[in-house]
Amino acid sequence: MSLVNVVNMVVLDNPSHFLSPFSFEITFECLQELADDLEWKVLYVGSAEDTTHDQVLDEILVGPIPVGINKFVLSADPPDIGQIPEGDVLGVTVVLVTCSYREKEFVRVGYYVNNEYEEPFDEEVGPPKPLDMSKVRRSILAEKPRVTRFPIAWGDDPEEKLEG
């Protein structure tokens, strides 16, 4: 059994401009006292073909964690457009929110993200280049997150049974 369960995650300021920060209101339950902090990360997938374009947008430690229901807002800067291949800026990608305890990831929440150019353009030619990023709108499919849980050892005993 996991000692920390994500109860709810709300995507704030959605849809928004590409250059706006990402914001997530996270509600989680802690079932017993934890010796260490939780590490939360926001990861933007820059290209489906190459993980070297993935960007960690923010990484924070949260703690000490009281037992019970906890809530906070996790905000992260937008991705660095210079690290995303030109052909991957517009269209569908993914943003991940992960949580780890003692450097072991135990939950990952993924959202599809659609980046669209706000002004009409000829589909055969494509949008104007270079892209005017102030005209790119980001829309996160907040209603359908993909939640993945991983079993981890929560205590100090290395022989402890993994719990997810």
Image (cartoon, rainbow, N blue to C red):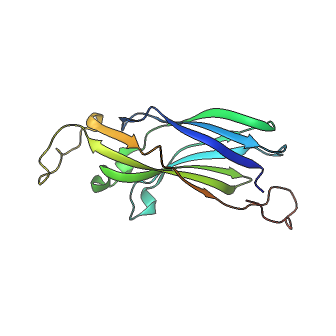
The residue at the point 75 percent across, 54 percent down is 2
Q: In this view, does 117 lie above or below 110?
A: above
Give whichever of 1, 120 is nearer the camera: 1
Residue furthest bottom as drawn: 159
Q: Describe residue 27's horizontal placement relative to residue 117 as left or right.
A: right
Quarter placement of the N terminus:
bottom right
Q: Describe residue 86's horizontal placement relative to residue 150 as left or right.
A: left
The residue at the point 18 percent across, 46 percent down is 127
Position in image of residue 26 (x %, y %): 61, 38
Q: Is residue 49 visible?
A: yes
Q: Describe residue 98's horizontal placement relative to residue 104 as left or right.
A: left
Q: In terms of image quadrants, where is residue 69? A: top right
The residue at the point 73 percent across, 41 percent down is 29
The number of discs equals: 0
Position in image of residue 113 (x %, y %): 40, 48
Quarter placement of the C terminus:
bottom right
Position in image of residue 115 (x %, y %): 33, 45
Q: In this view, does 90 lie above or below 135?
A: below
Q: Is residue 64 visible?
A: no
Position in image of residue 147 (x %, y %): 57, 54
Give whichever of 109, 79 is nearer the camera: 109
